[in-house]
Image (cartoon, rainbow, N blue to C red):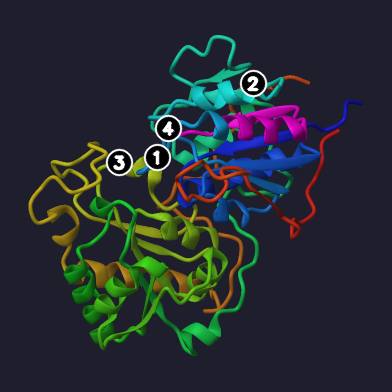
Amino acid sequence: MNAAPRTLVVRLDSAGDVLLAGPAVRAVAAGSSTTAMLCGPAGAPAARLLPGVDEVLVHEAPWVGLDPPPVSPDACRELIGAVAARRFDRALILVSYHQSPLPAALLLRLAGVPWIGADSEDYPGALLDLRHRRAPGRHEAEAALDLARAAGFVPPPGDDGALRVLPPPDTGALTGPGPYVVLHPGAAVPARAWSPDRARRAAEALHRAGHRVVVTGGPGEREGTAEVAGRHALDLGGATTGLAELAGVLAGAGAVVTGNTGPAHLAAAVGTPVACLFAPVVPAERWRPYGVPHVLLGDQEAPCADSRARVCPVPGHPCLDGVPDNEVLDAVATLLRGARADHRPPSAAPAPRATVTAPGPPPPTGGPGPGAGARPGTGRSPTVRTAPADRRPPTTRRP
């Protein structure tokens, strides 16, 4: 029998993108002796939370992100050396529907990776061994798992294909006792979030409706979360020390109100229902919360639809700021009723539940495949870093 391969999974985007790769990563881990992930700095913390990941490599790619670094030959050589040293047998490059995997494939080829698969609309020449075509309109989580299946990796027995992270810590000391609803007002892309004033009014409305509201945000969002929380909510902006602790806060919530941003996918990964303020700048069918009960809020036919705009091009941001309080309250009430029907304890973090409003796990597609230094003058951290994932649960191995 052939030994199970050493496999590298590449996802160079944000934390939310990496979380959506989770089902595909578990399938790869079930058929690999070692599974590593290559991520950007924004996605690496999420990769360290994914079951099945043994090691995380970090590279800030110049073709990805909102503020990409300049192309650096030294950084490219460093990445090539780090990948070559690990002698991977196979690599899967995960990209969004509008991205190309070919820059990453070229670097992996130079690192000596003998077999590479990816979704690619562009002609790959000798860069890909598996040029997979994603099905039209596929959710990002499903598209990634489709690619894994086409490469010969199947989910382990009992895996439902939902998002999942390692068990988060208990965050009761942060949130305090009693049920609560999380409002996460921020997003890396302003077009995908409420304006601060609209989020503040939503926090007030939730409070008046009898909900205990917890406002979350990163260290750079403290001023905004304080404004949103006001006197009506608990402000945890910058209080969570990392993504795992934020996962704990989200896991304890009855529901999460947030935009199309990483915490929406993190909430889904810990099984918490999501009221998602979804600006139609990207298609909801590809990016909506996956595998949990959720309600989409926002005008999906707005003029900005499918524009991929980062800043709302319509004065007043009507697709999201125009969502009335009663729709927000109705969405939260609906999700909480569903949670009570499931008898979910407020502090539990079970495997994500099935939902009639979210896409289900994909059917099998395709056939089997084949048997850190800083850049000068930038002040940035090393472009390639590694971190062991020593909490990996047991997985089923293929021979």
| x and y percentages locating residue 26 in the rendered image | 67, 45
Precedes in sequence: disc 2 or disc 1: 1
Q: Earlier in the sequence, mark 3 or mark 2?
A: 2
Q: Which residue is mark 4?
A: 63
**Mark 2: few, some, or many residues within 10 Å (few <14, many ≥20)?**
some
Q: Earlier in the sequence, mark 4 or mark 1?
A: 4
In the rendered image, which residue does mark 1 sit on? 68
Tell whether 183 sits left or right of 105: left
**Type of residue at label 3?**
Val
Q: Which quarter of the image is occupied by the N terminus?
A: top right
Q: Which residue is mark 3?
A: 282
Q: Nearer the viewer, mark 1 or mark 3?
A: 1
Which is more foreground, mark 3 or mark 2? 2
Is 101 displayed left or right of 384 in the figure? left
Which residue appears at 58% of the width and 36% of the height?
Answer: 10
Residue at image location 18% in from the left, 69% down from the top: 198
Q: Which mark is residue 110?
A: 2
